Amino acid sequence: MSKVLKLGIIGCGRVAFHHAEMLKGIDEIKLVACCDLVEDKAKSLAEKTETKAYTNYHQMLDKEGLDMVTLATPTGAHYTHTKDILNYRPIHVLLEKPMVLRIAHGLELNTLAYKKGVSIFPVYQNRFNTAVQRVKSALVAGELGDVVLGTVRVRWCRPQRYYDLAPWRGTFSMDGGAHVNQGIHYIDILRYLAGEIEEVHSLFAQLGAKLEAEDTGVSIVKFKNGGLGQIEITMAARPDDFEASVSIVGSRGLAVLGGICTNKLETFSPSPADQTRCSEEVPMAYGLSHRRVYEMLAKAIVHGGNAPVEFDDGLNTIRLLHALYRSNEEHRWVRLDEEVESKRLGESNKQLLAQYLIR
Ligand SMILES: NC(=O)c1ccc[n+]([C@@H]2O[C@H](COP(=O)([O-])OP(=O)(O)OC[C@H]3O[C@@H](n4cnc5c(N)ncnc54)[C@H](O)[C@@H]3O)[C@@H](O)[C@H]2O)c1
């Protein structure tokens, strides 16, 4: 393996441009090519990054000798695209969130990657925000004591025009609703900080726009460590985004993470001075921590360090999403160890998926 990883980006939409920005200045990774089914989009990112443009990722894989690709295609195509890449020309894959929409698909991809001798790395960049890391270290060191309550509260505005941007948005087969697309970051942080969840009870609704899946939901959760929690997410707040917070009430103190992507430590009773010291200004809700993900990835692949987030850990957040969906579908408590999948999230829609297959 060369010391500088050769990277390609597949899917040159909204988040791919952010990836390109975050890669600047990382010496161990060189972006060499960009691919999108839409030629103008591939060209636009390629021009900006002075790389080559492709409209067919097989051709990019054939010609560029890549070590890794970042997959930033629509969520519901992640499974199909990753499987195809691993079978066609196995290389490492950095998989944007949500990594997959079915638990079974995640297990299958991980087994396939292992057989092919490569890895799939999930993106949960907000875990690496300074504020989140400070709360994590406080929980590990006992500064906050035991988890009493863990709460997610997202009050955002996604009007109809947002769902109308692309045919995959808000569908069960390709995207999921507020919990899966937007809420996943905060739900993942809740798990990351407060620990694994034993059981959940959810109620979902569509209250602000017409989409297939939910734009609003409330859930109560019980952590394995005995603590209790609440997840309240809506995209039907108007006229603006108001709040995205994760708070932990511990037996010895309180931590509240806020800002637009848990980039601010708003309350931290063990050491209030850290509230300012550990808060970061970010220009947009994607935050700045994709850069940290790439830095950790480079170390993991080139020098043999820890993956930013292990695949199984990332998949546990998908398991939690399925438990929340299933609870809403069946109006009952769902235990995580039932390992049940939602009846709808990640359902097959060959017609919609066909729009995203290489030609
Ligand atoms: N980590 C984060 O904070 C974050 C933020 C935004 C989006 N995302 C995730 O990134 C993914 C993409 O989101 P987006 O907002 O950029 O979507 P988007 O619709 O703007 O871009 C997706 C792009 O993929 C292209 N594409 C589809 N199939 C392709 C194929 N076979 N080959 C090459 N290109 C293909 C489309 O033409 C489109 O340009 C989603 O999974 C989304 O959830 C993550």
Image (cartoon, rainbow, N blue to C red):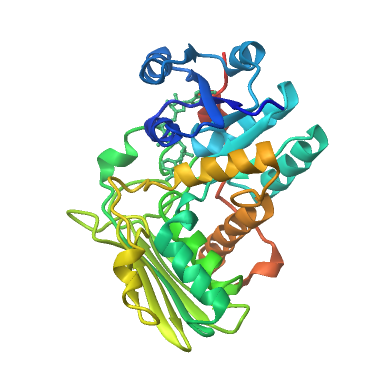
Identify the residue at image location x=55%, y=49%: 345
Name of the residue lying farthest toward the left:
239
Q: Quick one: quadrant of the C terminus? A: top right
- Residue 292 position, x and y percent, is 49, 46
Name of the residue lying farthest toward the right:
115
Where 99 falls versus 68 (above or below)? below
Where 285 falls versus 90 (above or below)? below
**Image-based side of 141 in relation to 238, left or right:** right
In terms of depth relative to the viewer, which is nearer, 43 or 156? 43
| Corner quadrant of residue 348 | top right
- Residue 253 position, x and y percent, is 42, 85
- Residue 267 position, x and y percent, is 32, 75
How many circles with numbers are drawn on the protein?
A: 0
Identify the residue at image location x=68%, y=54%: 312
Q: Quick one: quadrant of the N terminus? A: top right
**Image-based side of 4 in relation to 202, left or right:** right
In terms of depth relative to the viewer, which is nearer, 230 or 145? 145
| Corner quadrant of residue 335 | bottom right
Where 306 falls versus 51 (above or below)? below
Residue 240 in view of the camera: yes
Q: Tell which quarter ligand 1 is in.
A: top left
